[in-house]
Structure formats: structure tokens, C-alpha cells
Image: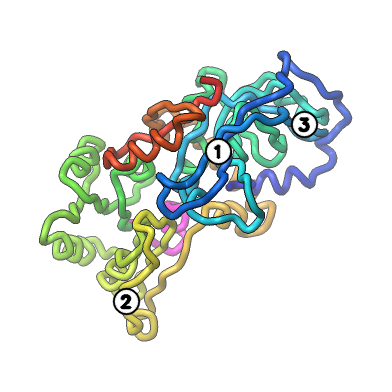
Amino acid sequence: MLATSGAMVLGGAILFQYKRKAGSVEEIPAKMRRLVLREANPDIKLAKLEVEEVDTPKPRSGQVLVKIAAAPVNPSDEGIWKVPPKQGYPIPLGNEGSGKVVASGGGFMASRLLGQNVAFTGQTYAEYAVVDATKAAYSLPTHIEPQDACAFIINPFTVVGIVDRVRQTGGKVFIYTAAASQLGQMLVKYCKTQGVTLINIVRRPEQAEILENLGADYIVDSSNADWKAKLEQLIKELDVKHAFDCISGDMPGTLLTMLPPGGRVWVYGRLSDSPVGGIQPLDLIYRGKKIEGFLLTTWMLEGGMFRALRRTIRTGKLVKSLIQTIFASDFRDTTLADLQKDYCALKASGQTGTKLRLRPHS
């Protein structure tokens, strides 16, 4: 999902690719297992996911082979199961993960990572993956077990990006939906360190309790009949003009209507599986309100390659320093064979704040 900005810049920097020889730190098997999509279906329980055995890929110059320790199942992963691909089947799955670099195809950056633990983006629902050493790999601190940093990129970088986007548009307070999710819990903790005020919308009382225990200052439970009145009062008292929504459906339009003239709503998810709706045309035409999308990759790459490089390095360092605190995740483990079943069961349970984690060598 995320070819980072630092990657794009460094990938073009030929001076880093000295002719260091290929090598490995352990014996590499000829075959490996991976999870692929054989048939998409809007009902994820009916999508056909299959474990297949394939040749273990070999890294070329500038690439490394990662023995994958773990990979999280994110909502963006689920989305791939629902839509037939244009390029045909099978589709290798997974967006991010972590593991140990066990082989290098040669080159300065690749050889430098040999033997290190890394977080990376790519096709991660597999036992091994080839990764561009300059585009998608982040070395991990030695005191962190690689499996505990498998969700290093997508959620933490998104949290930093959301807060940065609000600040770029002059905001110091914003509304966030589905706030009891792991990303939402990270936002609560991160915003407190950044002097940013967060209004959290949740769906159930037990979710509100989770955020209260994290020290959230403002929580609105949408299961209460008066939730809109409470939110409107907070918008007025705190002069709120910004909101981030990952639900879609009518929620973005509802929030946009509540915000004052000049208000802005960013949509970055579709948990409801419904198109964005409920938008009043007069809000857009006369009241100067805006609704737009937010994509992590776009935020990472904006402003030109040198700004993108600085942003990537800065965000990576920040996440490394906070991966065991603000950006820590709670996981439930699964295997390649059980991933689909376990994910569907976890989703049906309605449990909040726990992410499914694939351990491909289990």
C-alpha cells in the first residue's frame, strides 16, 4: 500500500547502490507458503482465500528477502477481498508486516539491512517476501520483537498524518469517528502529546469506557438518542471546524451539516460499505464547506521529493520511539489457513481495539 516518500527519493539515489555482493544469514527453503485471493465477494465470508505453495522469491540487487514474523489484518486488507481485480487471479495478499532480513541481493542499502529486523510494506501474507531496501523497509530497534512491530506503518503513520493535516488547515481541535478502534485509541494518546483536542464518536457505552480509561476528554456515544445535540454543543463550545470519518455512508454528510461555515470533513475509510451521502448542496455552494478524501500515501508524498523524504524520516523516527507506548497494538494471532475464518469471527463479535495478527510460520 505504502511506497514511502523516502523510498522514492532514496530509490533514485544511485550512489547508495555500491556493488556489495549478495548474501544470506541462514538457509533459505526452495518453497514457501502464501495466502492468495482466488475469488472476490462482497461478503467476505464467501470470498475464496487459498494457501498455496510457490517458489521462494530471490532478491535482486537493491532488494532483500524478509522472513516474515507477523502481518496485521487491516480494513484495507479486507477491502481487497470484496472487489474482483482487473489484473486477474490469484492476488497475493497483505499490505504491511515485519520480520528478519535473511538474504540480500547485493547493493549497499540491501547488504546494510542483512540480519536486521525490519517493518515493511508489500505482500505480507506469506512466509517470505522480497522488499526493495530503499523503498519499503524500516529497520527496527533491537529491543523490540519483530512480531510486535508488524503494524508499524499504516496505523501509526495515519495518526501522524491526520494530526498534521488538521494543523495544516489551521485546526487545533477535530472530530473523529469509530474512535474506539486501535487507530482511534492511538489518536487519543497522540493528540494529548501534541496539544490537539479530540472529540471522539463511538457506538457503544463499553467503547466510551475504553476511551475514558485512556484519558479522552470528549466522548460522544452515537447509541444515545441525544448524541447529535451533544455533538452540536461541543462544536459550538470548542469552535470545531474539522472532522475525520472512516465510516462513510451518511456520517460525513451529517458531520458536514453540523460544522460551521468553512468546515471540512475528510473521509478515509468505508466501514459501513456505503457510498458517501447526506451532503447538503448549500453547505458546499454558499457556506464554503468542503468534503474530501485522505489517503496516507498522498500525504506522505506531497510537497515534492525532498519534503517527502524529510517527512518520511521524521515520521519513522517518531513511530520507532513510540511503538511500545502510544503506537502499541493489541493482537490476536492466527495462521495462514485460519486467517479468513478468524477475521470474520473477530469482526462479527464487534470486539474493539484488537487486531488480528498473522504468524505465517505457525
**Which numbered dot is residue 288?**
none
Q: Residue at 31% of width from left, 73% of height from top?
A: 278
Mark 3 or 2: the one toward you: 3
Q: What residue type is labelled 2?
A: Pro
Q: Where is residue 40 in the image (x, y as percent from the top left)?
A: 51, 51
Q: Mark 3 points at which residue?
A: 59
Classify 10 Å Cα crowding around label 3: few (below 14), some (14-19), many (20 and above): many
Q: Mark 1 points at which residue?
A: 96
Q: Where is residue 243 in the image (x, y as percent from the top left)?
A: 34, 61
Q: Is residue 166 part of the magenta span, yes or no?
A: yes
Residue at the outermost right position: 19
Question: Real-space Cα distance between discs 1 and 3?
Answer: 18 Å
Q: Where is residue 179 in the image (x, y as percent from the top left)?
A: 30, 48
Residue numbers of the magenta segment: 162-173
Q: Mark 2 points at which residue?
A: 261
Lower sequence index among marks 1 and 2: 1
Question: Real-space Cα distance between discs 3 and 2?
Answer: 54 Å
Can you see residue 70? yes
Lower sequence index among marks 1 and 3: 3
